[in-house]
Image (spheres, helix red, strand yellow):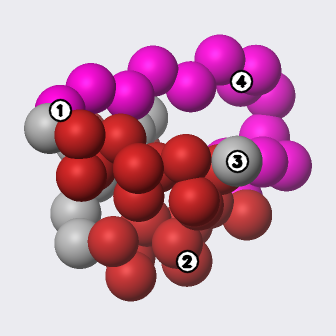
Amino acid sequence: MVEEVALVGPLAKVREEAERWRTSLPTLLLVGGPIEQLRAAAEVFG
């Protein structure tokens, strides 16, 4: 159920699903966690 509304899991999986998120209706991305995860998110979605 969580995977229907959130990008969760290993970085490779999130990278694969990022394009689907970009072409969907949501316009806000909330990211939290250790600095390493924030940097990875910035790389994927930046």
* Badge 4 amino acid: Pro
Is any part of residue 3 visible from this angle? no
Q: Nearer the viewer, mark 2 or mark 3?
A: 3
Mark 3 or 4: in front is 3
Q: Is residue 38 left or right of residue 33?
A: right
Q: CA distance from mark 4 to mark 1?
A: 21 Å
Q: Eyeballing the image, is 28 above or below 20?
A: above
Q: Nearer the viewer, residue 3 or 35?
A: 35
Q: Is residue 46 visible?
A: yes
Q: Is residue 9 left or right of residue 25?
A: left
Q: How far apart are the alpha carbons under marks 2 and 3?
A: 15 Å
Q: Where is residue 13? Give x, y as percent.
A: 38, 76
Q: Quadrant of residue 16?
A: bottom right
Q: Disc 4 on helix, strand or loop?
A: loop
Q: Earlier in the sequence, mark 3 or mark 4?
A: 4
Q: Earlier in the sequence, mark 1 or mark 3?
A: 1
Q: Which span of residues is magenta-colored? A: 20-33
Spatial CA distance of label 4 from label 2 is 17 Å
Labelled disc at residue 6: none
Q: Residues within 10 Å of mark 3 (few under 14, many from 20)?
A: few
Let me know if residue 26 is in the magenta part: yes
